[in-house]
Every structure is written in structure tokens, then in C-alpha cells.
Image: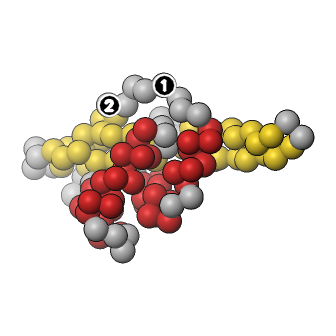
Amino acid sequence: MSMQASNTRSEPTPEPSAQLDVLGDECARTILVATSDGPKTAKELTNRTDSSSATVYRRINNLLESDLLSECVRFDDDGSHTTAYEATIETLQVQIGGDGIDVSVSEIED
């Protein structure tokens, strides 16, 4: 089964501290890792985690709001389509210094 995805995200970049807060949750980290190799549906992500679908949807929303995940439409060969989610970052670097905590993000190149 061949699939294509179309990105529909266009949101401003959130505060780095919000991104760190989201990454403090194990379910959110599992979703981010699972979506780093391509779009996954909420059902696929629920199967990948040991969490309820309600919890997975909450974490998806948190990741979307933090700009760590994007929503896209996945088209299957049979013409059907579904909403899927894909990681938007490749690297997140945290530096701690006298001026505080600095977070830099490297986005995934299309």
C-alpha cells in the first residue's frame, strides 16, 4: 500500500519552554518518535502507546500546539484519505547557561 501525505500546518512557533513541557510526557515522546519516520493516524499512535485514545488525542493536540507535530491528510491507493500526524522536528537542543535555558529546534526538511 503506497501512501502520500499533504501537510496542512501553518502556525507560529511556540515558546521553547512549552515545547519542553510537552516533551516531559512519555506518551507525547512516544508519539513524536513514532511520527518521525512518516505520518501516523491517531489509531496507529494509540496502538503504539499504552494509552487510551483520549490520552493520545490530548497529547497530539499538545504536540500540535507546540509545533512539534503537524497534521496532514494521508491518501491511500484506493482513494480513501484520513488525518495523520507527522513530526516537524529532527533535533531539539537544550543549552543551560548563566542567562537561562535556551532551546533550539532543527525542523525536518521537506
Classify the position of the N terminus by image quarter.
bottom left
Name the side, left or right, on which 3 lies relative to 68. Answer: left
In the rendered image, residue 43, in percent from the top left (x then y), is placed at 24, 61
In the rendered image, residue 19, in percent from the top left (x then y), is placed at 56, 44
Mark 2 and mark 1 residues within 8 Å of each other at the beta carbon: no
Q: Residue at x 62, y 42 (%)?
A: 17
Amino acid carrying mark 2 in the image: Thr
Q: Is residue 32 above or below residue 87?
A: below
Crowding near pointer 2: few (<14 within 10 Å), some, many (20+)? Answer: few
* Gap in angstroms between the C-alphas marked 2 and 1: 13 Å
Asked whether residue 88 is in view, the answer is: no
Count of numbered tags: 2
In the rendered image, residue 100, in percent from the top left (x then y), is placed at 80, 40
Residue bearing mark 2: 8
Residue bearing mark 1: 12
State the SS at label 1.
Answer: loop
Residue toward you, 30 or 76: 30
For residue 57, what is the image quadrant?
Answer: bottom left
For residue 52, what is the image quadrant?
Answer: bottom left
Q: Residue at x 36, y 74 (%)?
A: 50
Closer mark to the observer between disc 2 and disc 1: 1
Residue located farthest toward the right when viewing the structure as drawn:
98
In the rendered image, residue 86, in percent from the top left (x then y), is placed at 40, 47
Label annotation for residue 77 = none
Amino acid carrying mark 1 in the image: Pro
Q: Residue at x 39, y 54 (%)?
A: 59
State the SS at label 2.
Answer: loop
